Image (spheres, coloured by chain):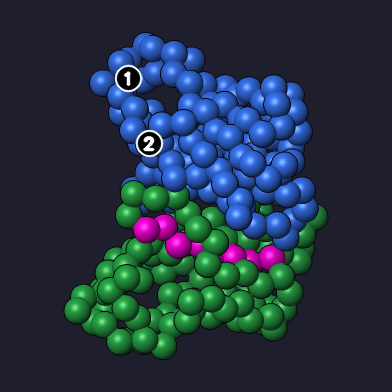
Amino acid sequence: DVKVTQSSRYLVKRTGEKVFLECVQDMDHENMFWYRQDPGLGLRLIYFSYDVKMKEKGDIPEGYSVSREKKERFSLILESASTNQTSMYLCASSRWGGNQPQHFGDGTRLSIL
Amino acid sequence: GDSVTQMEGPVTLSEEAFLTINCTYTATGYPSLFWYVQYPGEGLQLLLKATKADDKGSNKGFEATYRKETTSFHLEKGSVQVSDSAVYFCALSENTGNQFYFGTGTSLTVIP
């Protein structure tokens, strides 16, 4: 089975801090994705990556950046955390190709105080 | 652009009731369609998928049929259980791309 592991289930940080969310997958997937999930808004794509050192903006990239130095690891960075970034963050991975399902981690619930 | 619309929730059913969650889509090409389930405190899990018109995906008693003529992929289950309480997401992915388009999710609560 595919395993997507997010480094923290719960995280509390302060406004202005630089925050790192880590995601690792063990199935050699080409694609990796970061979403945020908010009540009533569903999943919104922040960034995705098709390959090492490659990144593409999703629908809501403002205030975020990403890093993919190794194929199995995709990091989401909040450069200067703000309270409106309090949310559930979900990482996913998939094989290259349009009919490939995405596989999700358990999520990180991030609170910015 | 591509999009997915699913029925508003929350949905509350008694155990053993019949479930339908409606999902319709808009796509420019020939998408694959998916249903995901999210149990409380967890990430999304793939429930079932269909990759072409008239395909039926099924898993754990749930099923959905890819209807190109009505651009729909409704989720059904004949007899729900308390353990089916979760949020259900419909999604599509174009066969020429790698992005997913998710619906906003439908919350289901099954009461004994």
Q: Name the residue under label 1.
A: A13
Tell me if B25 is positioned left or right of B20 in this view.
right
Where is residue A94 drawn, in percent x and y? 67, 48
| Number of dots carrying numbers | 2
Asked if one can make out residue A12 in the rendered structure from this viewpoint, the answer is yes
Is-magenta flag for residue B66? no
For label 2, the SS is loop
In the rendered image, the quadrant that contains the N terminus of chain A is: bottom right
Chain containing the residue with disc 2: A
Q: Which residue is drawn at 76% across and 66% down?
A: B30
Q: Identify the main secondary structure in magenta.
A: strand
Colour chosen for chain A: blue
For label 1, the SS is strand
Q: Which residue is drawn at 41% across and 31% down?
A: A8
Q: Mark 2 points at which residue?
A: A9
Judging depth in this view, the residue of A82 and B108 nearest the camera is B108
Q: Which numbered disc, 1 or 2, marks the residue closer to the eye? A: 2
Magenta extent? B32-39
Colour chosen for chain B: green
Classify 10 Å Cα crowding around label 2: few (below 14), some (14-19), many (20 and above).
Answer: some
Tell me if B24 is positioned left or right of A113 in this view.
right
